Amino acid sequence: MGAWGPGPFDNDDAMDLLLAYEERGTDALREVLAQPDDRQGDGFIDADLGGRLIALGEIVAACHGHPMRGGPSDFPMGADPERFKVQMAAHASDVRAEPALLAGARGAVNGLLANPKVSELAGLWQEGQQLDAFARTIADLEARLAKAAAS
């Protein structure tokens, strides 16, 4: 069983992206954006891709000065928020230098991720009766990405 939790990095796929970002910078982010949203051709976003898209959005938002504002449990696997700042700063200037990353993150992180009809993650949160909280998380991330685009 893999890791699972309410934070944007509390699943294996998101943590894998965070680690890849630390090691390879923007290349890791571009790879996520290059993946098709719909591997099966059925209009459905699988949980693994959904988790990576949320992590991508969080990384891009943080690099543009709009990080998540939660407590320590909201950061990667409960890690220290200060470490997260260091992780983001490692390649932040490279992320900001590529407007396509912000545009791609904004396009990828949208209300569809909170719709159980098209998002496996949303369906899982709905089963756990926490879909409203998940939808608020997505809306907050969308708003921070919009602020990043406006700055």
Image (cartoon, grey):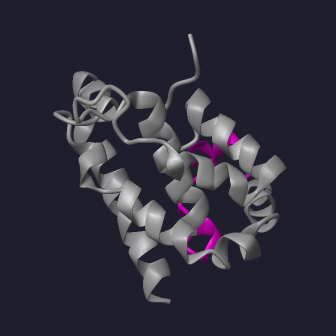
Q: Is residue 77 visible?
A: no
Q: Residue 37: name its quadrant.
A: top left
Is residue 67 within the magenta segment? yes
Residue 59, above or below 114: below
Name the outermost residue toward the top: 1
Say if residue 46 shows up in the picture. yes
Nearest to the observer: residue 5 or residue 55: 55
The number of numbered discs placed on residues in the rendered structure image is: 0
Residue at 65% over, 77% down: 96
Q: Is residue 3 magenta?
A: no
- In the image, taking residue 8 as reference, residue 43 lies left or right, namely left
Question: 6 or 2, which lies in front?
Answer: 2
Place of residue 92 in the rendered image (x, y in percent of width and height, measured from the top left):
73, 70
Which span is picked out in magenta?
62-80
The residue positioned farthest toward the bottom in the image shown = 151
Residue at the limit of the structure toward the left, as seen here: 117
Image quarter of the N terminus: top right
Left or right of residue 18: residue 114: left
> Can you give x and y, in whole percent of width and height, for residue 38 in the image?
34, 36
Based on the displayed image, in which of its 4 quarters is residue 39 positioned? top left
Residue 117 position by quadrant = top left
Instruction: Identify whether 1 is placed above or below 25.
Output: above
Q: Position of residue 91 (x, y in %)?
A: 78, 66
Residue under the image location 27 percent in, 30 percent down:
41
| Residue displayed at 28% across by 23% down | 128
104 vs 90, nearest the viewer: 104
**Relative horizontal placement of residue 107, taking residue 61 as reference (left or right):** left
